[in-house]
């Protein structure tokens, strides 16, 4: 896993640049005050030991995720060996995974930083900065007590860049960082963390049915297919669930039920064991957000031993066909004309 260390003086814009960088990459932001503020709120003052222990928990758990990497903000006192040791310890953990560590130092004029110290975004995320008189006095003290801007050539790392962002907008700085280190853009990793499949209990079938009807009704109104899941009776759904070889799952994102998937498991012939998806659906307000793709990946994870997967879809729905082909499905068999407006096509995926 990769790590971006954003370094700089107080109010130089580390958090704000990190927020913009998170929008255009598959990196998550862990800014310094995410641990500092809760500790101050609980203890009534800054407790360095508590902050350090909480940081360790976040690092440990984050390294177990599937993200490309983390953006970590830090005010580095270059004249303190303990800070050099701390950064080395953090970077060693990420490099041990085979990841790359990037170092970005931001510098800006003091007058600009004092103005940034008053911005709405900063005060919203950092309660301890809201007493501006104290906050400004602390900034000036830090600058005189520690050396928090590196000397020329002092930082020896290969993947290092220094940016004077005195007159640059945060999104512009984020783009500069992304381009300088050729960072990958947003992918499916974030959705993979947020989307889950949860098996539907018998007492939840009515909720699933309502979600199914809402999801398929726009297609029914478009094609008037008499076999549409939008108009099938709930008894048929319940009978399908009771066959023993079919399982329904809610597609859940951030704790909300956004769709469903029914998976049939056919194991009678070991030489031709397969799973059939019929149907999969996403509520209209959550469509075209990559959720269907991730839900299919989650389905494959549930049944890792199954190599062959089957489904059918509407030929005229190019988005659906593209989704399945993106997952590796290929079109097989003959087209089935349902009516003058609608044709069904079969797809298969062999994951062997």
Image (tube, grey):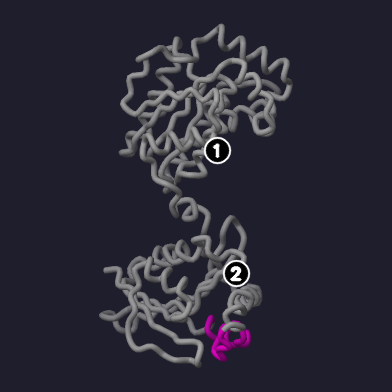
Q: From this view, report whether residue 117 is shown above or below residue 230.
A: above
Residue 242 highlighted magenta (yes or no): no
Q: Spatial distance from mark 1 to mark 2, Cα to Cα?
A: 29 Å
- Give the number of the disc on residue 19: 1
Closest to the observer, 219 or 272: 219
Judged from the image, the secondary structure of the residue bearing numbered disc 1 is: helix
Q: How many marks?
A: 2
For the view shown, which residue lies furthest in the top direction? 144
Residue 134, position in %: x, y? 71, 15
Dot 2 surroundings within 10 Å: few (below 14), some, or many (20 or more)? Answer: some
Closest to the observer, 296 or 223: 223
Residue 225 highlighted magenta (yes or no): yes
Residue 295, position in %: x, y? 47, 64
Quadrant of the frame with the C terminus: bottom left
The residue segment tinted magenta is 223-241
Judged from the image, the secondary structure of the residue bearing numbered disc 2 is: loop
Q: From this view, report whether residue 340 is shown above or below residue 68.
A: below
Residue 94, position in %: x, y? 37, 35
Residue appearing at x 54%, y 89% in the figure: 227
Closest to the observer, 312 or 254: 312
Q: In the image, 10: left or right of 186?
A: right
- Residue carrying label 2: 283
Residue appearing at x 32%, y 35% in the figure: 96
Residue appearing at x 62%, y 78% in the figure: 209
| Disc 1 to disc 2: CB gap under 8 Å | no
Q: In the image, 153: left or right of 138?
A: left
Number of the front mark, 1 or 2: 1
Residue 125, position in %: x, y? 65, 33
- Give the number of the disc on residue 201: none
The tag earlier along the polypeptide, 1 or 2, is: 1
């Amino acid at each position: 896993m990769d790590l971006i260390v954003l370094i700089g003086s107080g109010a130089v814009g580390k958090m704000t640049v990190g927020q913009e960088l998170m929008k255009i990459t598959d990196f998550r932001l862990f800014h310094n005050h995410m641990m500092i503020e809760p500790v101050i709120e609980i203890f009534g003052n800054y407790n360095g030991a508590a902050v350090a222990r909480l940081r360790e928990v976040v690092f440990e758990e984050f390294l177990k995720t599937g993200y490309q990497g983390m953006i970590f903000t830090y005010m580095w006192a270059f004249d303190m060996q303990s800070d050099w040791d701390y950064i080395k310890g953090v970077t060693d953990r990420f490099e041990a995974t085979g990841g790359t560590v990037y170092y970005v130092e931001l510098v800006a004029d003091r007058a600009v930083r004092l103005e940034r110290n008053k911005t709405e975004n900063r005060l919203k995320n950092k309660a301890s900065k809201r007493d501006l008189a104290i906050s400004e006095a602390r900034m000036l003290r830090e600058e005189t007590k520690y050396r928090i801007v590196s000397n020329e050539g002092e930082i020896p790392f290969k993947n290092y860049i220094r940016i004077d962002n005195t007159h640059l907008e945060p999104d512009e700085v984020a783009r500069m960082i992304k381009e300088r280190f050729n960072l990958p853009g947003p992918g499916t990793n974030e959705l993979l963390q947020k989307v889950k499949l949860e098996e539907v209990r018998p007492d939840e079938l009515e909720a699933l049915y309502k979600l199914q009807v809402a999801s398929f009704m726009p297609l029914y109104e478009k094609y008037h297919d008499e076999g549409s899941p939008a108009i099938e009776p709930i008894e048929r759904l319940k009978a399908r669930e009771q066959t023993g070889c079919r399982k329904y799952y809610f597609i859940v994102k951030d704790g909300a039920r956004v769709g469903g998937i029914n998976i049939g498991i056919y194991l009678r012939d070991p030489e031709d064991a397969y799973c059939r998806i019929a149907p999969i659906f996403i509520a209209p307000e959550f469509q075209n957000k990559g959720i269907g793709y991730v839900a299919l990946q989650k389905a494959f994870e549930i049944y890792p031993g199954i190599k062959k997967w089957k489904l059918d879809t509407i030929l005229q729905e190019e988005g659906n066909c593209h989704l399945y082909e993106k997952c590796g499905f290929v079109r097989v068999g003959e087209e089935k004309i349902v009516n003058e407006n609608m044709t069904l096509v079969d797809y298969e995926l062999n994951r062997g």
